[in-house]
Image (cartoon, grey):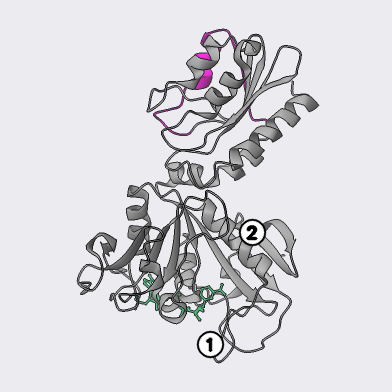
Amino acid sequence: MDTAADTTAMRRAVTLAARGLGSTSPNPVVGCVVLDATGQTVGEGFHQRAGGPHAEIHALRAAGAKARGGTAYVTLEPCNHTGRTGPCAQALIEAGIARVVYAVGDPNPQATGGADTLRAAGITAERGLLGEEAEAVNAAWLTSVRLGRPHVTWKYAATLDGRIAAADATSRWITSAEARADVHRLRAEADAVVVGSGTARTDDPQLGVRGIDRAVQPLRVVVDTAATAVRPGARVLDGGAPTVVAVADDADARHLPDEAVLRLPRAADGPGLDLAALLAALHGRGVRSVLLEGGPTLAGAFVAAGLVDRVVGYLAPVLLGAGPAALADAGISTIAQALRLDVTETVSIGPDLRITAVPGPARKEI
Ligand SMILES: NC(=O)c1ccc[n+]([C@@H]2O[C@H](COP(=O)([O-])OP(=O)(O)OC[C@H]3O[C@@H](n4cnc5c(N)ncnc54)[C@H](OP(=O)(O)O)[C@@H]3O)[C@@H](O)[C@H]2O)c1
C-alpha cells in the first residue's frame, strides 16, 4: 500500500524527471529517488541526456551500499534491455533494492518487462503511483512511442479578445517580457520549433532559446512549400541552432543550404505540405516534441489534421477588436464540431495569463 512517504518520494522523482526535458530525446525523461530501509533519502537521479546513464543508475550510485533493503521510486518502469547503457532492472537487483515503485509502465516494446524481471528476482514491484503526473511530464515521449510521431504543443500569444496582431499587422509585443521569457523555457523543452512561411516572412524569427543556461537548442523548422519565405540572411539560418526548411518535392530551393532542405509531398487535400509527412520526417530525426509557434494558418491546419496534443495560450489583458485571430480555419464550421479541451493549468505570468489545455474526450453539451 502506498503511504504519504511513497507519494512524497514519487513526487520528487517526477520533479527530477522534468529536469531532463529538452535534452533526453529520443529517450524519455525519467526521475528516480532511492530511500534506504529506514525511509531516508539516500539517492536521487534523473536521465540527463541520451546515451548517458539512466535515472536509476545515477540514484543508485549516489546511494551506494545504503540502497540495500531500500525502495526505489521511478517515474517509468525500469528498462529491461541493454541499449547504450545496461538494463536498470538488473542494476536495481544487484544493488539489493527490496521494493520498486514505478509510476508508468514502459510502452516501448524493446524496453518493457523490467517489472517482471524484478519480480522474478524476488523484488516487490508496484505500478501506478502518481501515474497521471508522471504521464504528463513524459507526454512527449509517450506520445511518440504510442503514435509514432512527435508530441505537438501549439503555443500562441494573444490579446484577451483572441487576436495575435493588430489590423495593420503590427504585433510586437502583445504579451509581457515575462511571458516571452517563459516561451524560451517551452522552446528549451522542445526538440523542434515549427513555424509557417507566413510567420517567417512577416517576423523573420530566430526561433532559438535565449536566456536559459545550458539549454539544448531545438531544431528550427520553417514550413515553406515553395521555398520563397526563407531567404539567404534570414535569422533562422544564423547558425545558432540547426535549421530545417520543409519544402515541396518540386520546389526550387537552390538558395538554401543543402543540409537545411527537407523535401516533402504536398498535402493531398489542401494547401501546403503534408503535415503528417513532416512529423514523420522529424520523428525519423529523433524529434519527440514539437513546439508549433504558428502562425494561425499553419496552426489551423495542424488542428484540422488532429495533430495538436497540447495548447499553451498566453493571454494578455489587452484588447484590439480587429486583427487576425489566434487560430485560422481548422475545418470546423458548426458548434457541434468544436474541438473541446480540458484545462490542465492556469498560471499568472507577470501581467498575463498562461492557459494550458489538452484535447478532451468528445463531449456532448446538454
Ligand atoms: N502571437 C503569436 O502567437 C504569433 C505566432 C506566430 C505568428 N504570429 C503572426 O501570425 C502572422 C502569420 O501567420 P499566417 O497565418 O499568415 O502564416 P503561418 O501560419 O505562419 O504560415 C502559413 C503558411 O504556411 C504554409 N504551409 C505549408 N504547409 C501548410 C499546411 N499544410 N497548411 C497550412 N499552411 C501551410 C502556407 O504557405 P506556403 O504553402 O506558401 O508555404 C501557409 O500560407 C504574422 O503576423 C505573425 O506575426 C503570431
Q: Magenta stretch: give its range.
A: 107-129
Q: Is residue 282 left or right of residue 133?
A: left
Q: Quadrant of residue 155?
A: bottom right
Q: Looking at numbered disc 1 in the image, what kind of residue is underneath it?
A: Ala
Mark 2 neighbour class, 10 Å CA radius: few under 14, some 14 to 19, many 20 or more: some
- Between residues 317 and 141, which one lies in front from this camera angle? 317
Q: Quadrant of residue 305?
A: bottom left
- Between residues 249 and 109, which one lies in front from this camera angle? 249
For label 1, the residue is 169
Marks 2 and 1: in contact by CB < 8 Å? no
Q: Residue at x 55, y 16 (%)?
A: 92
* Sooner in the amino-acid sequence: mark 1 or mark 2: 1
Quarter of the figure that contains the C terminus: bottom right
For label 2, the residue is 357
Which residue occupies the extreme right position in the image? Answer: 4
Q: Tell whether circle 1 marks a residue whose Cβ is less than 8 angstroms from ligand 1.
A: yes
Question: Where residue 142 sits: x, y (%)?
Answer: 50, 42
Q: Residue at x 45, y 76 (%)?
A: 199
Q: Tell whether circle 2 marks a residue whose Cβ is less than 8 angstroms from ligand 1.
A: no
